[in-house]
Image: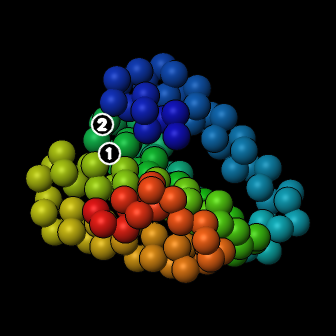
Amino acid sequence: MQIYSLAGSENWERINIRLKQLKQVDARLTQNSNFAKLNKAPLEASIQSLEQAVNAKDAQATMQSTNEMVAKVLDLAEQANPSSLVDTMRLGYYARKLEMAAIAQNSDEVSTSAKAIQQTWESKKSQLPEGTGSPEVEQVDHW
C-alpha cells in the first residue's frame, strides 16, 4: 500500500522502487504451491496497468491501479486460503475506493462503494461469536 500513499505525494522515485519490489514478489508467487494453481491473469493485468500509470506519472491512476491490484491480490489470497483477514483487508480496499470516488465527486461510485462496505461488514459481523459486541461494533452498525 505504500505505492498508494506515495502517489499522493507524487514521489515517483520511491514509487518505482516499490513497483520493482512488487514485481519481484509477484514473480515469487508462482513458486508458492497455494498460488501456483490459481489464475493470476487478473493480477498480472492489474500490475501492468499500475506500471503504465506510474510510467505516465499519473497520481490518480496510480492510486486507482494500486487499489485495484490489492483487490486482485485479495481475490487470490481468498482462493488460496480463505480467512477473515481477507475480509478485513477488503474493507480497506472499499474505503480507499470510496475516498477516490468522493474526491472525484462520483456519487454513483460513492454509493456503490458504501454498499460494498456495508455488505462486507454484514457478512463479517455474522461470523463474530456471540457476546463479542463492543461500543465500536455498535457504532459501525449505525453508520
CB-based contact (under 8 Å), mark 1 and mark 2: yes
Horizontal placement of 86 versus 15: left or right? Answer: right
Q: Quadrant of residue 10?
A: top left
- The crowding category of the residue bearing disc 1, from other C-alpha atoms within 10 Å (few below 14, some 14 to 19, many at least 20), is some
Question: Residue visible at 58% across and 31% down?
Answer: 18
Counting from the top left corner in percent of width and height, residue 107 is at 13, 63
Kind of residue at disc 1: Ala
Q: Is residue 73 above or below residue 126?
A: above
Secondary element type, mark 1: helix
- Residue 126 in the image, given as x and y percentages of width and height: 55, 80
**Left or right position of 136 against 35:** left
Residue 142 in the image: x percent, y percent? 30, 66
Of residues 21 and 124, the one drawn nearer to the viewer in this rendering:
124
Q: Is residue 119 visible?
A: yes
Q: Of residues 61 and 86, which is closer to you in this image?
A: 86
Disc 2 residue type?
Asp
In this rendering, position of residue 46 left or right of residue 105 = right
Please name the residue that numbered disc 1 is placed on: 61
Alpha-carbon distance for marks 1 and 2?
Answer: 5 Å
Can residue 40 be seen from the camera position used here? no
Residue located 77% across and 55% down the image = 29
Q: Nearer the viewer, residue 134 or 121?
A: 134
Image quadrant in which you'd find residue 57: top left
Q: Residue at x 79, y 74 (%)?
A: 37
Residue 33, percent from left and from top: 88, 66
Q: Is 80 located above or below residue 19 in the figure?
A: below
Q: Which residue is mark 2?
A: 58
Q: Residues within 10 Å of mark 2 (few under 14, many from 20)?
A: some
Name the quadrant of the C terminus: bottom left
